[in-house]
Amino acid sequence: MHQPSTTPLAAPPASLDTLLERIAAALERLAPPPPAAPDFAAAEAFVWHPEGHRLAPVPHVNRVDMSLLCGIDSVRDLLRANTERFARGLPANNALLWGARGMGKSSLVKAVHAGVNAGLGDKAGSLKLIEIHREDIESLPELMGMLRGAPCRFIVFCDDLSFDAADTSYKSLKAVLEGGIEGRPENVILYATSNRRHLLPRDMMENERSTAINPGEAIEEKVSLSDRFGLWLGFHRCSQDEYLAMVQGYVAHHGIPIAPDALRREALEWATTRGSRSGRVAWQFVQDLAGRLGVRLTDTPA
């Protein structure tokens, strides 16, 4: 019976080793360089760009002072308290700010971030605000991986978040909010604004109810997304008095010279022509008024 040879294989010739090393070096040169580690000291706010796996610093955030946000005192206090707890390393909830358009939802997030950051004493500036665009939600797990273990604490903020019927990217958000195997990093919290309480159009949920074999389960799948935000803050249309208070606050802040009676009359006429009253309408009126009177505005709300 033939016995297998026990003679060891000969080593490859030196020329083959050299060739393999050259191939490996060429492949390394072709591979894209790893993304550079973010410099979180560069700014207090960043914008996430998934195509380059990078965080672009924002040197000047477009925001207003919290004192100019009128008519939303209760939600302001709740969001600020939640943010302060998070900034100090205490348990805090993800927050969904939903409701009437133009009532200061995104402005409040940015103002609270600035106010809490300023009150951190020797740790001032350690709370970072990172904006992720709605269309980039599917890249949220990649962003979480970049932030996990970083020395700062982060508010990941998505403005005007909502989903349409054929959109399944909400599942990435669900996994990050709660339920994923890694979960949300301890140093990250998510804030989102939306005109919809459940982030989905009502007719979409009604269609699910009418066509699904088990309509209850279909609705639960959709509604469970907003349930994963522990803090729900509702914004509602403002009254006439609240609208006028917003206008008067902006006028006083920017030193616009106008008589109170004329201001009230023109502000109400502006709201009537727009068919609505809100913080956004109030600011648009003040911009028009300042332009007509030749007054320069020093900052602008979102």
Image: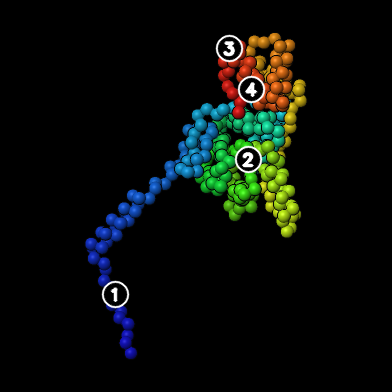
Q: Is residue 134 left or right of residue 67?
A: left
User: What residue does disc 1 label?
Assistant: 8
Q: Is residue 240 left or right of residue 284?
A: right
User: What residue does disc 3 label?
Assistant: 294
Crowding around mark 4 (Cα neighbors within 10 Å: few <14, some 14 to 19, many 20+) is: some
Mark sitting earlier along the chain (3/4): 4
Residue 272 figure quarter: top right
Q: Quadrant of the N terminus?
A: bottom left
As measured in the structure, the alpha-carbon distance from the residue carrying label 1 to the one carrying label 2 is 65 Å
Which residue shows up at 64% across the image and 22% down it? 284
Measuring from the top left, give residue 147's x and y in whole percent. Answer: 53, 43
Mark sitting earlier along the chain (1/2): 1
Q: Quadrant of the C terminus?
A: top right
Crowding around mark 1 (Cα neighbors within 10 Å: few <14, some 14 to 19, many 20+) is: few
Measuring from the top left, give residue 64's x and y in whole percent. Answer: 61, 25
Q: Is residue 213 left or right of residue 192?
A: right
Secondary-structure class at tag 3: loop
Crowding around mark 3 (Cα neighbors within 10 Å: few <14, some 14 to 19, many 20+) is: few
Report if residue 53 is visible in the image: no
Near-viewer residue (86 or 78): 78
Mark sitting earlier along the chain (2/3): 2
CB contact under 8 Å: marks 3 and 4: no
User: What residue does disc 4 label?
Assistant: 284
As measured in the structure, the alpha-carbon distance from the residue carrying label 4 to the one carrying label 2 is 23 Å
Q: Amino acid at mark 1?
A: Pro
Q: Answer above or below: position of 96 versus 272.
A: below
User: What residue does disc 2 label?
Assistant: 161
